[in-house]
Structure formats: structure tokens, C-alpha cells
């Protein structure tokens, strides 16, 4: 109990002091995970649309595959990306290992299935509801994709936030491909792992609380943006 | 009143030849042939499960028949499709404003902005929705939503408008408003082809009747003839209200 | 009506993505090397003390990737780092012999320590040496947490068991607990279980979650823990920043580097001892 109280106090102190190193770590966390979410959205939404709206042989296989990848273990993604980006790996010449770009790449692989699987679900249901009407108006399935992306924007935002939540909270992949290098690739989760291994549990938990606060802030911002556009449309 | 056809050649008559539709070996529609000419309003009648909605969807091209064919006079499928619209039992509207819903349909037809604006305003005006143009479509009452679906279809100025049970989910007041909008559309020169449960509505709006029973076309006659002197036993029972629907 | 807003949002997100992909802010233009080292040195805080001094002098930033010695050497073999700073002499020598590294330079050392509960149920406190202490742990079946991760500390621990003539692995899962994690996590586990463990003085000196654990044995040649620095061989991996990495290794062994290592203290205690002047320069 005393430990937990100490953690809360530490979290509060961290926020109030606005320590430069902490700001840097929080900034990098956001930069990496938002970039990963952005890229995962660019790929995941169209993928979800194709899997949810197009009829092609093997569609069910794709659906099952996407749903299984929801539970992709971060460590495995980290290892795969490490082996790709390692100097001895196929993409080694790019020199991306132990950079934020490598972390973005790993998180992108981790969360694209999440965005795709959840948006497939949303778009498939919307398409069932809208297909006849949109076809009647002269929209084929390809023309309908942007329409339904817009129609489902609030539900899709939830899919994207789920991806963000996973990205900002995972440690297994980024610690392998980023290396947790101070001032270069140290993010919230790897800093927490570091403080845990130093045995500074209150500081680790304090950082953890901060991470949760950060996640709440991002979700609240998304909710507000949503509320504003909703009221603009009403 | 918006003028239909827009100078394009008439796509009517619509000819259905030996139409059949089967799902997993079950024949839902069988050997149905008819011709729908340019008269004001054809009503497809029949008890539940007769194949009314199916026939409408086959005519509009939302489904491909497993047997027989649907043909339009005129240049080709794509051109014919541009001259049709359809209103469903439950209005399917986009999550945007009333005006934007109409605009979306017009944009799919590739119309320029000025013309879209003009047509949308006109259609909303004629359906009594002009005051609601800026409202979110999904915040409207069901009756208003169905009128918006009609306005959207009307703005396309189709030669043929299909309506599938357009008032089945509405209360009597809303039904009246929707029917008067349908009359206005009919008066503007658009051919209506509709299904309905409501014998009164069929009498009020229809001038020709296709009567289906168990997936077959049983009667094809003028509205007056059907309601006064049905030629088939099923038709007689239906008009007397003895066939469940 | 919505499109411009979406476009603006997209532009912001794209800018974010590009800025992240463009790499770290400070070092993008700067000179840097990447060094694989051990969690024990990182966790102790040594690098936070000595690296700024090296960077101030040379303008070369040193990026530390802290993993177990085994994985650190593996990173070197694959060319993913420019140098390694680890503590497992025989593995380091094998690394150099296989041509992955240029030369091993011993730069510092500290001591392994046997830690355990204050009450010391196995009575290791007054044993002759570390192997004898571990033998007592085994005889009494007292809990012992092992790294179990092929790290330098883990290898050293296994050497101690061998000299004690005991193979603890058959007892794994009973009194012998292999955590398979880093030093800190293993110590956290030991603190929770009230178990014995082998760690190094550097890590222990800066470890905060000790509960009632204490150092029970801290001296003797068997517990010496030397660290070697090796530049990765550019003949194997041409992209290795050999010149800068060599400067770093040379600096660690130089009077200035040795002074930096010697002056690192936690609670007034030295945790690392610079190598004596037997080094090659």
C-alpha cells in the first residue's frame, strides 16, 4: 500500500517537475506510436474494407487470419523486425536498427492487423446495411469504400484508438528493435522496464501511471474531436 | 415540378421474360413474364412470400435472375440504370445532413455543382424538407427520413422509380405525406413501380396490377379490372382479404 | 465540407510520421557509435556518469544497448553494434578468435557478490569462499534465483557451481529458480522470495528494492568480475565505425577514462575499478 502511494506521489512529482528527460521520453513515445498508428490506418482501413466488402475466394481465410493476428505477441514482432533490420539481415543496409524508425515499423506491423480486423467488422456490417441503396444510386463497391469509411468514421476511430492503445503500451517489440538507448530510443514503456530492473519500483509505477494518463489524454482528445464534428453535423 | 427523363430516350417498356430465381435449389420465383409500359403506376401485389420484393430487385438490377432475363428498351444496361431509382422499405440514409444526402446521389451521377445544388433544393422543396436541409439526416423522424429517401430519388429525375413497401414502417399520418409525395413524383412524369401490402394504397395509386402468388405471376391487368373482377381464385381471395399477407 | 478537415488532419499526421522516421532529433547530424553492453553496467548508472565526459571530449555520442553478455556478443557478431563492453572472458576471447572482434581490452572490473536474506538460513556468511557458500545453499535446499539467461553473471554463477562440484540444473524449479531475465528482474524475484542470488557489486550498489536482502559474501578471486571492451571487426562488417569505437575503447583504458570509472560512486561507494596499467598502451 505504501508502495502504491509512493508511486502516485512519484507520478505527480514527475508531472509537476516537467523534467526535461521525461518530456523527451513522452514526446518520443507519442511520436513513435502516432506515426505507427498513422501508417497502420493508411494500410489497415483499406485492408479492412477489402476483407469486409469485396467478395473473393479466400475471403474467410483472410478474416480468420486478421482476427488471429489481433493477438500477435510483440516480442515475436520485435524479433522478426530485428532479423529484418539487423546488419546481417535483408534490410540491414538501411541502418535502421536501434532508431525510432525501427520502432515505428515494429509497432506498425503489430497494430495494422488490429486496425484492419476491427475495421473489417465495422465495414462488413455497414456494407450489409448500405449495399442495396448504394448500388441503386450507382455506386459500385470501390466507390462505396470511401463512402463507408466516412459513414463509419466514429466506429473506425475506435478501431484506430485500439491500435494506438496497443502501440503506446507495448514494450516487447520496441525494446528489441529500439534498444532502449537513452535520448534516442527510450520511450515510456522501456523506461518503465529499465526502472523495474533497477529495482526502483515506485519510479517505474509512477511512469506507468503517467503512461495511463497519456493514454487517457489521447483518447479524450479523440473523443472531443468526435463530439465537435458530430455537433457540426447535427 | 422537376421534369423526368431529361430529354433522354424512354427506357420503357420493361420486359421480363420467363424470370426465375432460386437460392440453394429453392425456387423463389418461377417463369414470370410481363411487360411494364409507360403508364403512371404499376403495383406488384401478393401475399407474403409471393416474390414481390424479389421481382422489384430483379427489375432494378440489384439481383441477377437465375433464369430468364430483364430487358429495357434503349441503349444498354448502364444507360438504363441511370434512368432508374429505388426507395426501400426502411430508408437507408448517410450520416450527414439532409441536403448532403441528396447531393451525394447527384454527385454519383457526375452532375456539376451548380446543378446539384439547384436539383437538391428543388427536391427538398417539393417534399417539404427544405426547412430541414441542414439537419442531420438520422435525426429526422422515420416519416421524414422516408420523404428524404424519396427526395433523393426524385432529384435524380429517373424515368422509373421502384418503391418497395414504402410506407410499411410508417404511421398513418406519415403514410399520407409519403403518398402525396409519390403522387407528385408520378405527376412529374416518373413511372412508379411499387410493391405494397396495403390494398387501399394500391387502389389509390396504381393503375396497373401484377399479382404474384407463391413465386408465380397469377394476374396482370389494369387496377380497375383486378379489384372489380379478379380472374383467378387466388386473386379473388386476395381482394376479399382472405389470403394472409 | 469534411474533406478539407480530413486533409489537414492527414497533413499533420504525415508530418508526425515523417519526423519520427527522420530519426532522433539530437544525433541525426552528430557522430555516434552504438555499443552493446550489459544490463548490470547500465542499471548501476555507470554510463550516465562516464559517457558525458567522453562525449564532451570527443564529440562522439555513445548509444548503449543494454542486454545480457550473450546477446551483446550476438549483436556484435551480426554487426548491429560498433563495439561491445561485456563480462565473460572466455566468451569474449572466443568472439575475438572467431574474427568478430579486433582485440579484447580489459577496461574495468568489479566483484560478484553473494546476496541473501539477512537471517541467512543456509549459513553462507562464514564460508571459506564462494563455491563453499553455494554448496551450503544446495545442501540446505535454500531458494536460489539464477539469471538463467546466458549472461556474464549467469556464466560466472555456473562456473562457481562447477567448482563447488554441484550441478544445480536437475533442481531447477525446486530450490533452484531460473528467472531467464535481466539482473534487476532476478533481484526483484529474490527480494520477493527471500532467496539467495549472485549479482555484481555495481548492480547491487544501485539496486533499490532490496527488502531484507544483504551481501553475505563479497571477496575472493573467484568473485572477481572483469569487463572487456572489443571493437567489432570491420573486415566482417564494413559499416562499423571502427575509428570512433576504437577511440572509445582507448579512452576507457586511458588515465582520463580510468579516473572517470574510479570516480563513479553510489552512496559514497566505488562500484567499478579501472583496469590496472597492464593494458597495452
Image: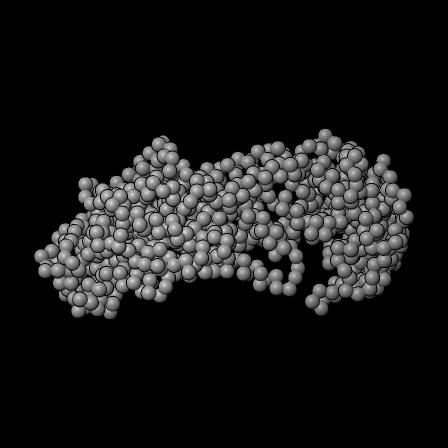
Residue A58: quadrant of the picture: bottom right
- Relative depth, front residue between A127 and A100: A100
Q: Pick the residue in front: A44 or C20.
A: C20
Give how far across and how far down residue B72 sits, in percent: 86, 55
Q: Position of residue C61 (x, y in %)?
A: 38, 44
Q: Nearer the viewer, residue A70 or C259?
A: C259
Q: Residue at x 57, y 51 (%)?
A: A44
Residue C80 visible? The answer is yes
Quick one: quadrant of the N terminus of chain C? top right
Residue ID at (27%, 47%): C254
In the depicted view, which residue is nearer to us: A146 or A121? A146
Q: Residue furthest front?
A: C281
Identify the residue shown where x is 17% and y is 60%.
C222
Q: Position of residue C117 (x, y in %)?
A: 16, 53
The answer to whether any part of residue A198 appears in the image is: no
Residue at the image position 36 percent from the left and 64 percent from the top? C99
In the image, is residue C205 above or below residue C170? Answer: above
Amino acid at each position: 500500500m505504501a508502495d502504491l502511494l509512493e508511486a502516485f506521489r512519484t507520478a505527480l512529482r514527475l508531472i509537476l517537475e516537467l523534467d526535461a528527460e521525461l518530456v523527451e521520453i513522452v514526446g518520443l513515445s507519442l511520436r513513435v506510436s502516432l506515426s505507427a498508428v498513422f501508417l497502420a490506418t493508411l494500410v489497415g482501413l483499406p485492408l479492412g474494407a477489402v476483407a469486409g466488402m469485396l467478395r473473393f475466394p479466400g475471403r474467410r481465410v483472410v478474416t480468420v487470419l486478421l482476427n488471429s493476428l489481433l493477438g500477435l505477441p510483440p516480442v515475436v514482432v520485435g524479433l522478426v523486425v530485428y532479423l529484418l533490420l539487423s546488419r546481417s539481415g535483408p534490410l540491414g543496409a538501411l541502418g535502421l536498427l536501434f532508431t525510432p524508425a525501427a520502432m515505428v515499423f515494429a509497432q506498425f506491423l503489430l497494430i495494422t492487423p488490429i486496425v484492419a480486423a476491427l475495421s473489417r467488422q465495422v465495414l462488413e456490417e455497414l456494407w450489409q446495411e448500405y449495399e442495396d441503396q448504394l448500388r441503386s444510386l450507382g455506386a459500385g463497391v470501390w466507390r462505396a469504400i470511401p463512402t463507408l469509411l466516412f459513414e463509419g468514421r466514429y466506429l473506425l476511430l475506435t478501431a484506430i484508438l485500439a491500435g494506438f492503445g496497443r502501440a503506446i503500451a507495448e514494450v516487447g517489440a520496441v525494446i528489441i528493435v529500439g534498444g532502449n538507448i537513452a535520448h534516442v530510443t527510450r520511450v515510456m514503456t522501456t523506461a518503465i522496464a529499465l526502472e523495474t530492473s533497477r529495482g526502483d519500483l515506485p519510479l517505474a509505477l509512477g511512469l506507468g501511471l503517467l503512461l495511463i494518463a497519456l493514454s487517457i489524454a489521447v483518447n479524450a482528445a479523440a473523443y472531443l474531436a468526435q463530439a465537435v464534428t458530430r455537433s457540426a453535423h447535427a | 415540378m422537376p421534369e423526368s427523363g431529361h430529354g433522354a430516350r424512354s427506357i420503357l417498356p420493361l420486359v421480363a421474360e420467363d424470370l426465375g430465381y432460386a437460392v440453394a435449389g429453392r425456387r423463389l420465383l418461377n417463369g414470370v413474364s410481363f411487360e411494364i409500359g409507360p403508364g403512371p403506376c404499376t403495383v406488384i401485389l401478393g401475399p407474403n412470400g409471393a416474390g414481390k420484393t424479389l421481382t422489384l430487385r430483379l427489375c432494378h438490377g440489384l439481383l441477377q435472375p437465375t433464369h430468364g432475363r430483364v430487358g429495357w428498351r434503349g441503349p444498354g444496361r448502364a444507360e438504363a440504370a441511370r434512368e432508374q431509382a429505388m426507395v426501400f422499405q426502411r430508408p437507408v440514409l448517410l450520416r450527414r445532413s439532409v441536403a448532403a444526402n441528396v447531393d451525394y446521389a447527384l454527385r454519383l451521377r457526375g452532375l456539376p455543382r451548380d446543378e446539384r445544388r439547384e436539383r437538391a433544393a428543388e427536391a427538398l422543396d417539393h417534399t417539404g424538407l427544405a426547412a430541414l436541409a441542414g439537419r442531420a439526416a438520422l435525426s429526422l423522424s422515420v416519416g421524414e427520413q422516408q420523404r428524404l429517401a424519396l427526395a433523393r430519388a426524385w432529384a435524380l429525375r429517373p424515368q422509373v422509380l421502384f418503391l418497395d413497401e414504402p410506407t410499411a414502417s410508417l404511421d398513418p399520418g406519415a403514410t399520407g405525406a409519403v403518398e402525396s409525395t409519390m403522387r407528385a413524383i408520378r405527376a412529374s412524369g416518373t413511372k412508379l413501380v411499387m410493391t405494397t401490402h396495403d390494398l387501399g394504397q394500391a387502389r389509390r395509386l396504381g393503375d396497373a396490377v401484377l399479382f404474384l402468388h407463391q413465386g408465380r405471376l397469377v394476374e396482370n391487368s389494369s387496377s380497375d379490372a383486378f379489384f372489380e373482377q379478379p380472374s383467378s381464385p387466388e386473386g379473388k381471395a386476395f381482394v376479399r382479404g382472405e389470403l394472409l399477407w | 465540407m469534411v474533406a478539407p478537415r480530413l486533409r489537414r488532419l492527414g497533413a499533420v499526421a504525415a508530418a508526425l510520421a515523417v519526423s519520427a522516421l527522420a530519426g532522433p532529433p539530437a544525433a541525426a547530424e552528430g557522430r555516434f557509435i552504438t555499443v552493446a553492453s550489459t544490463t548490470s553496467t547500465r542499471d548501476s548508472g555507470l554510463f550516465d556518469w562516464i559517457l558525458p565526459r567522453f562525449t564532451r571530449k570527443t564529440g562522439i555520442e555513445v548509444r548503449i544497448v543494454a542486454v545480457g553478455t550473450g546477446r551483446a556478443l550476438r549483436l556484435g557478431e551480426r554487426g548491429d553494434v560498433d563495439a561491445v563492453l561485456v563480462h565473460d572472458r572466455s566468451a569474449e576471447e572466443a568472439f575475438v578468435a572467431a574474427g568478430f572482434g579486433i582485440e579484447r581490452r580489459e577496461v574495468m572490473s568489479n566483484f560478484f557478490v553473494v546476496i541473501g536474506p539477512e537471517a541467512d538460513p543456509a549459513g553462507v556468511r562464514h564460508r571459506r569462499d564462494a563455491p563453499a557458500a553455494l554448496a551450503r545453499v544446495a545442501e540446505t535446499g535454500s531458494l536460489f534465483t539464477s539469471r538463467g539467461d546466458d549472461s556474464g553473471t549467469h556464466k560466472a554463477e555456473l562456473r562457481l557451481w562447477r567448482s563447488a562440484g554441484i550441478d544445480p540444473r536437475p533442481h531447477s524449479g525446486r530450490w533452484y529458480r531460473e528467472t531467464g531475465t535481466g539482473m534487476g528482474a532476478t533481484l526483484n524475484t529474490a527480494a520477493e522470495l527471500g532467496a539467495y542470488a549472485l549479482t555484481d557489486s555495481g548492480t547491487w550498489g544501485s539496486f533499490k528494492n532490496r527488502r531484507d536482502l544483504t551481501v553475505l559474501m563479497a571477496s575472493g578471486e573467484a568473485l572477481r568480475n572483469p569487463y572487456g571492451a572489443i571493437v567489432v571487426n570491420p573486415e566482417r562488417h564494413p559499416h562499423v565505425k571502427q575509428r570512433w569505437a576504437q577511440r572509445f575503447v582507448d579512452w576507457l583504458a586511458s588515465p582520463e577514462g580510468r579516473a572517470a570509472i574510479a570516480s563513479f560512486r553510489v552512496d559514497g561507494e566505488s562500484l567499478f575499478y579501472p583496469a590496472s596499467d597492464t593494458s597495452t598502451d
